[in-house]
Amino acid sequence: MITPIDRSKERRRIRNRIRAKIAGNPLRPRLCIYRSLKYMYAQVIDDSMGKTLAAASTAEKEMKSSLKNTGNIEASKLLGKTIAERAKAKGIEAVVFDRGGYLYHGRVKAVAEAARESGLKF
């Protein structure tokens, strides 16, 4: 009998494999993505200090009010633009992208492309 795949366990395994190769430093912090069914979250993290330098989410009041649906590609594009603006305000020009074990497709891809279009390099 074939056992079903535990998707959260599989994502954690992939995420750990990615994190073994990727680390944020003061020159190029890590842009980390988390995706739930309802919201998207993005953080710019300096792993050497263990500090979050900038963060944005579609669960924030100002984003929720401007969006009809917070869990779609349109919301993800707005999140990418917002995180890039907040990072640039802190003086961050370049980041390392951490897709968090998710496929580079759909909402994750939309966040990355919107951040690039807003001037963040990775």
Image (cartoon, rainbow, N blue to C red):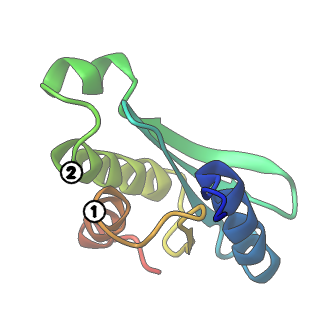
Tell me if I can see residue 11 in this picture. Answer: yes
Say which element carries label 1: loop
Instruction: Name the residue: 23% across, 53% down.
Output: 77
Gap between marks 2 and 1 measured at Cα: 7 Å
Q: Residue 30: percent from the left, percent from the top?
A: 64, 66
- Give the quadrant of residue 29: bottom right
Read off the residue under disc 2: 73
Quadrant including the N terminus: bottom right
In this rendering, position of residue 13 left or right of residue 38: right
Q: Are marks 2 and 1 in contact (CB under 8 Å)?
A: yes
**Residue type marked 1:** Gly
Read off the residue under disc 1: 106
Instruction: Work out whether 89 lies above or below 96.
Output: above
In this rendering, position of residue 80 left or right of residue 89: left
Q: Give whichever of 56, 17 is nearer the camera.
A: 17
**Residue type marked 2:** Ile
Which residue is outermost to the right? Answer: 49
Say which element carries label 2: helix
Instruction: Name the residue: 29% across, 37% down.
Output: 71
In this rendering, position of residue 88 left or right of residue 3: left
Q: Residue 103: percent from the left, percent from the top?
A: 45, 70
Instruction: Name the residue: 39% across, 33% down.
Output: 39
Tell me if I can see residue 24 in this picture. Answer: no
- Give the quadrant of residue 75: top left
Pointer 1 local density, CA inside 10 Å: few below 14, some 14–19, many at least 20 = few
Instruction: Name the residue: 71% across, 54% down.
Output: 9
Instruction: Work out whether 94 lies above or below 80.
Output: below
Q: Residue 72: percent from the left, percent from the top?
A: 22, 43
In this rendering, position of residue 64 left or right of residue 56: left
